[in-house]
Image: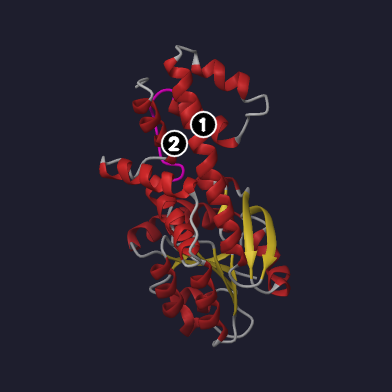
Amino acid sequence: MKAGVIGLGAMGHGIAANLARAGLLAAVWNRTRSKAEAFAGEHGVAVADEPATVAAAADVILVSVSADNDLLGVIDALKEGLEPGKVVVDTSTVAPDTAREAAERIRATGAGFLDAPVSGGPEGARKGSMVMMIGGDEAVLDRIRPVLDPICGSANFMGPSGAGQATKAVNQIMVAGIMQGVASALAYGRGQGLDLEQVIRVVGGGAAGNWQLDNRGPNMVHDQFPPGFKLALHRKDLGIVRDVLAAKGLSLELIDRTLADYDRLIESGHGDEDISALYRLRCSELGSG
């Protein structure tokens, strides 16, 4: 099987690079062509003129875009290159209803569709260690696992179309809660005059240990927030969660609080920083800035 990748952003670039190293990548397409050409020059793969060309060249087409409308636009643009037996795998984070709509549009071509959002950040994409949460037809997933093996640590079937996106929403809610806790705790420790690098080593080995503390804490204590997971993108994901809940007349305090915090940071020009920039607010609130 050969793969194609549409979208060479922070996640798509790592996915495509791992597929190229495995000898599975046939073609790439990116809205900004220069980025695709740079990738192709490095990895020796074809640059497609349009998404449909990628679909025609590959058996499995992986899509990595930022927003719901972007996904549906790409789906419509690549349909012409699809035929029965091909599979579109969307690694973006979108609403479950958007995933179901994409699946319906693809189904009309006879091809398969899997909503397969990922967790692990750009680091996981580069290392091929991401976790994939997949909705759709399990038989289709099993058939294309050889293409997914180089790009993820595990590809987990979660249920019918939309189930992958619903699972990703669970992940994003947890990330919000964990980062709120890490930011608040480190801001408190800073206010107490503690050596925060030592704090991270000590508490990271106990019950409070977590990925965000280990991987983002060291930058936070130096007031550095290089984007692993851009704050503006997590804000988009949590907005999806809020809308899904609101449609049922429900809400979560954690979501509302984090969205309000993100809006403050975005208004201050920090939307392209990592979500760990929440530390800025907590330090300000606790007078430890």
Q: Which residue is mark 2?
A: 276
Q: Position of residue 286 (x, y in %)?
A: 38, 23
Tag 2 secondary structure: helix
Q: What's the amino acid at mark 1?
A: Val
Q: Which residues lie in the magenta part?
A: 221-230
Residue drawn at (46%, 55%) of the image: 237
Q: Nearer the viewer, residue 2 or 194?
A: 194
Q: Quadrant of the C terminus?
A: top left
Q: How many marks?
A: 2
Q: Nearer the viewer, residue 139 or 101?
A: 101
Spatial separation of the CA atoms under disc 2 and disc 1: 8 Å
Q: What's the amino acid at mark 2?
A: Ser
Residue 182 numbered mark, or none: 1
Residue drawn at (65%, 72%) of the image: 160
Q: Position of residue 97 (x, y in %)?
A: 51, 72
Q: Is residue 126 magenta?
A: no
Residue drawn at (42%, 44%) of the image: 257
